[in-house]
Image (cartoon, rainbow, N blue to C red):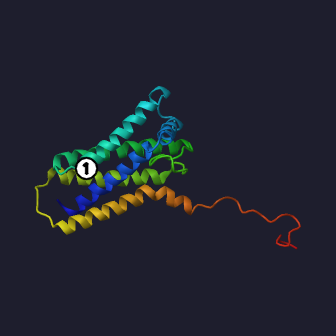
Amino acid sequence: MPYAESAVRVLIATVFLVAAAGKVSSRRSFTAFTASLGQLNVLPGTVIRAVAVAVVATEWLVCSLVLMPWASLAGVGLALAAVLLVVFAAVIARVVARGTRAVCRCFGSGSREPLGVRHVVRNLLLAGFAASAAGTTLLREAAPAEPWALALSALAGLLVGGCVAAFDVVAELFRPVGPAHSPPSGSPLQPGR
């Protein structure tokens, strides 16, 4: 197994695992995710819950497949991840282009960040990595690999996947809180006195 492929498989598995687990960690999380799909205004209201269940089930499936020791199943999982990520990117691009301020519930109910161009870029980059790894996984011959190098590449994938999953939370920490409050009138700190 090439080392880059190993890193990408773990990266994709980490991202999809955190996404799926975050959406079903509690009834409230799943309800928030389902409600966020309704706020996108891209689906009829009658199918929103079914789509939410399908998204979570597919994320779990991707997770399971990409970590399989059999190249053909891992390749299918990576290809499925790429397709799903492109669909996510297209939906998010449509929502952003309309100016809808829907909140990203990509990784559960914790985020308050509205969907934006960075979400489109993130999903397209991940889709590119997944598609590339799917191609090498499905088309390559089995080759011996050094266990320490595989472990190192898997660790790299895990770290990058964790960073991708935590990106919105970290971005919120650096966002300005709001307009600066001026001191009360008559305060010795008020400018111009």
**Residue at image x 31%, y 61%?**
157
Disc 1, SS: helix
Residue 157 sits above or below residue 60 on the image: below
The location of residue 51, given as percent across then percent down, is 41, 33
- Classify mark 1: residues with Cα within 10 Å, few (<14), some (14-19) or many (20+): many
Q: Quadrant of the N terminus?
A: bottom left
The location of residue 18, given as percent across then percent down, is 39, 51
**Residue under circle 1?**
66
Camera-nearest residue between 76 and 87: 76
Q: How many marks?
A: 1
**Residue at image x 40%, y 47%?**
21
Camera-nearest residue between 135 and 78: 78
**Residue at image x 34%, y 38%?**
57
Residue situated furthest front in the rendering:
26
Say which amino acid is labelled 1: Val
48 relative position to 156: left or right: right
151 relative position to 36: left or right: left
93 relative position to 144: left or right: right
Camera-nearest residue between 41 and 73: 73
The location of residue 74, given as percent across then percent down, is 21, 48
The location of residue 65, given as percent across then percent down, is 24, 46
Residue situated furthest top in the rendering:
46
Q: Quadrant of the C terminus?
A: bottom right
